[in-house]
Image (cartoon, rainbow, N blue to C red):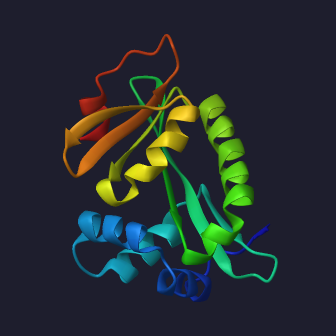
Amino acid sequence: MMRIKITKKNLNIFFDDLRKEDLDELYFTFKKNLRDKFIKICLKTPDTYFLADDYGYPLAIGGIKKKLIDNIKVGQVWFLSSNKFKKNKKAVLKYIKNKIFTFKNECDILFNFIYKSNFGFLKWLYVLDFKTIDINENLKLFYYSKGDVKIDLRYITG
């Protein structure tokens, strides 16, 4: 497994093999022009990692969008994967687990929303000390907060 450059070409290859669960989540989020919006966000987000197999085929992309709210460091974490992710799942998840630990050191709160098509990943997030709040039957908010940090999550998630 290796990191690859975030280019339109690599992002298009990745998007063409995106897991159905992640495509459903993007559709829920963006509704239309999924590919264009996805590529635009990936190219503009500085704290993004892009992983590939040993042959350079894209497996997963993710990262964090950081902001400071009332002197609290908040990070919105995200992750999407291709169908080939399944063959490299152990190595990819180990990499991401290390990234999550880094993000926990850099931020006071980590969060994002997860669409029902990806609820299977919640078990993995629970192992990493994330908690969830049910928004509705289609959506959950997952978050990690350092013990002494108190903030109304509705304030940071909009």
Residue visible at 44% across and 68% down in the picture = 41
Q: In this rendering, is residue 57 above or below 142?
A: below
Residue visible at 34% across and 60% down in the picture = 117
Q: The N terminus appears in which quarter of the rendering?
A: bottom right
Q: Position of residue 102 (x, y in %)?
A: 68, 38
Residue visible at 30% across and 29% down in the picture = 153
Q: Nearer the viewer, residue 81 or 43?
A: 81
Q: Is residue 132 left or right of residue 10?
A: left
Q: The C terminus appears in which quarter of the rendering?
A: top left
Judged from this view, the residue extending furthest toward the top is 148
Residue visible at 40% across and 74% down in the picture = 20
Q: Nearer the viewer, residue 104 or 119?
A: 119
* Rendering quarter of residue 127: top right
Q: Position of residue 132 (x, y in %)?
A: 36, 33
* Rendering quarter of residue 99: top right
* Rendering quarter of residue 133: top left
Q: Nearer the viewer, residue 88 or 105?
A: 88
